[in-house]
Amino acid sequence: MRGQGFICCASQPPAGSPCSAGAAAAAPPVNSFLSLSSAPSMESTCSGRIWTCSWTLQERKTRPCITLIAVSSEEGASELSLERMLHMVFGAMVLIVGLEELTNIRNVERLKKELRASYCLIDSFLGSSELIGDLTQCVDSAIPPEGSLMQETLSGFAEATGTAFASLLVSGRVVAATEGWWRLGMPEAVLLPWLVGSLPPQAARDYPVYLPHGSPKVPHRLLTLTLLRGLELCLLCGPRPPLGQLDPQLLERWWQPLLEPLRACLPLGPRVLPEGFPLHSDILGLLLLHLELRRCLFTVEPSRDKEPSPEQRRRLLRNFYTLVATTHFPAGPAEKEEEAGSPAQRPRACYLVLGPGAGWRLVAVQLGPRRLLLLLSPQSPAHGLRGLATHTLQALTPFL
């Protein structure tokens, strides 16, 4: 667990709110307050960080506001991680109940009841998830062994069912998707796979969802079909097709010829990379981001017989990503101006040696839109970190 809890408050804008985002909505009639399932008891003593985000919702002259408050006892919790987590929580609430229900609150108890459907998704942001899209704002992906064949079949199946939005998911990671699915905006591009991964296993679902960016007030249908245990086919669509139209005969006709490639996708959940992909023996974990495509590969599977544990590896890489994103490779207008004016001054690599005692190495390298972060064993020499990271990035470039 990452030691974080939540309180959700829908009210008028508080003075000094540290962040806001625009969206259209109607004003709630009164100031309202509600708490989510993961909120800690306010009677207990809390030593940690409190971070709030407010969304000012503008329509005509009304300016209602929704405020989320995160309470974290995690040592060293960064503003970036807490702020992005709050944005994901707000997106999850919109995804499940829609923006209108959140901003036009007529009955707080009814809203609390409707929001229960989002609790599992929200709780997944609090725990030690194997995914990282909540922090990077990139879609967690995996590389299938026969990607072109799977992509071709998925596109044909989507066209046959009348939707442009389809994907294949393994343990919350996208292994293949149509162009329409990849064009989904943030945060729904990250939230939809997380939602499917947080739900109990089911052969088929017809799940109403709102798109926080693309359609926050009009619901769509998320259809999911389990092709193999742990491998789900997802379709985002309107009133059609009905779930009953996706009968076993239709699925068998399209997917039976790919049975072996589909089975080969099942281990990709934690591994992400195809079996046999050559990684240096010093690599304990990696995070590869394509900042333009908004996709990422994240794994801590290499050399599982070595320390630290997978949970520690994920935490180290998450913390290092936060450091890199805020200090060494900051995003935004300032970076673009610097890059245009003097590209040579822009950092291309950085590394960190943890100690005392542990000695694990963390290195980041950026080349164009790709950024690679590696966790390495203490035996990896510091003078070779940049070369190792650059070589690994070049080897991974064809995949992402």
Image (cartoon, rainbow, N blue to C red):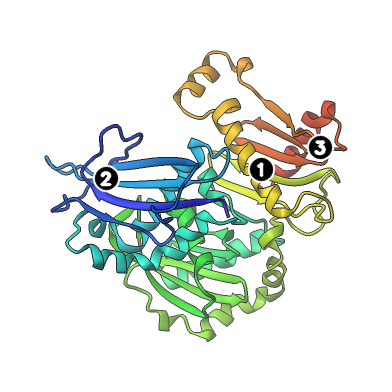
> Residue 27 in the image: x percent, y percent?
16, 49
Residues at marks 3 and 1 touching, judged by CB atoms closer than 8 Å: no
CA–CA distance between discs 3 and 1?
A: 18 Å
How busy is the neighbourhood of tag 3: few (under 14 within 10 Å), some, or many (20 plus)? few
Task: Tell me which residue sits at (17%, 61%) in the image.
Answer: 106
Q: Amino acid at mark 1?
A: Leu
Q: Nearer the viewer, residue 399 or 128?
A: 128
Q: In the image, is 299 to the left or to the right of 239?
A: right
How busy is the neighbourhood of tag 1: few (under 14 within 10 Å), some, or many (20 plus)? many
Residue found farthest to the top? 341
Give the residue number, with chain letter if any, for mark 2: 23
User: In what element is the residue under mark 2?
Assistant: loop
In the image, residue 82 above or below residue 142: above
How busy is the neighbourhood of tag 2: few (under 14 within 10 Å), some, or many (20 plus)? some
Give the residue number, with chain letter if any, for mark 1: 317
In the image, residue 235 above or below residue 19: below
> Residue 365 in the image: x percent, y percent?
69, 31
Q: Earlier in the sequence, mark 3 or mark 1?
A: 1
Give the residue number, with chain letter if any, for mark 3: 357
* Quadrant in the rendering for residue 110: bottom left
